[in-house]
Amino acid sequence: MTCPTCQQNIQTTVEYEIGLFTWLMVGGVCLFGCAIPLVWLGCCFIPLCIKDLKDAKHTCPNCNTHLGTYKRAK
């Protein structure tokens, strides 16, 4: 894409951040796992480690302008 700030043709830099969808998955694992003792071992926090469940923040690698965030849940 072309950065609207520096006008360079770029491929965005992506940073993954914990968002609403990630916390919903933590809650879902916790709710469904209540019958299984694995929840007490911390398995409900596994979604915090999976980047496909996090929001993706796109920035320009040249000028570090925030170009947008893809939120998994709105």
Image (cartoon, grey):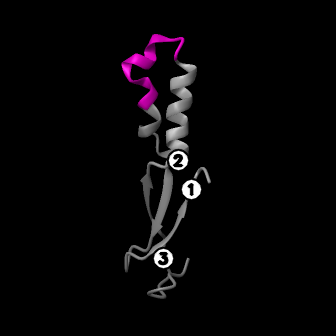
Q: Which residue is mark 3?
A: 10
Marked residue nearer the N-terminal end (2 or 3) = 3
In percent of width and height, residue 53 lies at: 52, 44
Q: Quadrant of the N terminus?
A: bottom right
Q: Which residue is mark 2?
A: 20
Q: Residue furthest right?
A: 74
Secondary structure mostly seen in magenta is: helix
The residue lying at 50 percent from left, 42 percent from top is 22
Q: Say whether marks 1 and 3 touch (CB < 8 Å).
A: no
In percent of width and height, residue 26 lies at: 49, 33
Q: Please give the count of numbered marks on the rendered protein.
A: 3
Tell me the amino acid under the disc marked 3: Ile
Near mark 3 (Cα within 10 A), the count class, few <14, some 14-19 or many ≥20, is some
Tell me the amino acid under the disc marked 2: Leu
- Judged left or right of residue 27, residue 38 is left
Q: Which residue is mark 1?
A: 71
Q: Say whether marks 2 and 3 touch (CB < 8 Å).
A: no
- Kindly report the distance in space between the C-alpha atoms of the residues bearing marks 1 and 3: 21 Å
Marked residue nearer the N-terminal end (1 or 3) = 3
Instruction: Please tell me the numbered disc located at residue 51.
Output: none
The residue lying at 43 percent from left, 74 percent from top is 60
Tell me the amino acid under the disc marked 1: Lys
Q: Say whether marks 1 and 2 touch (CB < 8 Å).
A: yes
Position of 48 relative to 74 (above/below): above
Position of 18 relative to 24 (above/below): below
Give the magenta range. Answer: 34-45
In percent of width and height, residue 59 lies at: 44, 70
